[in-house]
Amino acid sequence: LRTRFPPGPPPSRSEGCDSDLLDPRAEAARLCTVRRLGADFAVACGGWLSRKSAYAHYEAWLWAARADASSSGASPVPVLPQQPAAAADELLLGRLAAAGAPAAEATTIVASMRHALERAAAADAAATKRVGGGERGGG
């Protein structure tokens, strides 16, 4: 059975999608960035939040950071938002306080994680731009 396509360029597998999001190198770089950020989170919060549940806390914090982008209808919602939602700071501050962290220390941890997320988002954007900007390897 042969399928005939209408005249013109062949349909793209990523039609309607941002092709940089589908690039395996961009995804691999993003995965490494998210893992490094998770390790930073575990170190920063490990003294207060249990190691056993550190990644559950990390995932909740990262989802909260994406809240503004997801509620704005942005598509796709970035994994690492350039401007994290204030809800992420509030969530982490609350969890640290519930674990007994002094307010000053919790505030310092929250600020350091916000900066770490902003740096990770900038690194991800730069890596995606490099991949999408023609710096692809031959193949």
Image: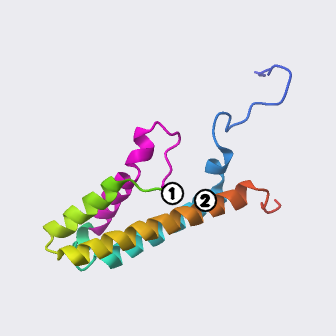
Disc 2 and disc 1 in contact, CB within 8 angstroms? yes
Task: Report helix, strand or loop for mark 2.
Answer: helix
Q: Magenta stretch containing residue 60, yes or no?
A: yes
CA separation, marks 2 and 1? 9 Å
- Callout in the foreground (2, 1): 1
Q: Residue at x 38, y 58 (%)?
A: 62
Q: Residue 71 location, x and y as percent?
A: 40, 39
Quadrant in which the N terminus appears: top right
Q: Residue at x 66, y 50 (%)?
A: 20
Quadrant in which the C terminus appears: bottom right
| Lateral position of residue 13 relative to residue 82, left or right | right
Q: Residue furthest right?
A: 7
Q: Total of numbered circles in the picture?
A: 2
Q: Quadrant of residue 95?
A: bottom left
Q: Residue 114 location, x and y as percent?
A: 40, 66
Main SS, magenta residues: helix
| Residue identified by numbered label 1 | 82
Task: Name the foreground residue: 135 vs 52.
Answer: 135
Callout 1 crowding tier (Cα within 10 Å): few <14, some 14–19, many ≥20:
some
Please state which amino acid type lies under the numbered disc 1: Gln
Q: Which residues are magenta?
A: 54-81
| Lateral position of residue 3 relative to residue 33, left or right | right
Q: Earlier in the sequence, mark 2 or mark 1?
A: 1
Please state which amino acid type lies under the numbered disc 2: Ala
Q: Residue 73 location, x and y as percent?
A: 46, 36
Q: Residue furthest front?
A: 104
| Residue identified by numbered label 2 | 125
Q: Residue at x 47, y 56 (%)?
A: 83
* Colour theme: rainbow
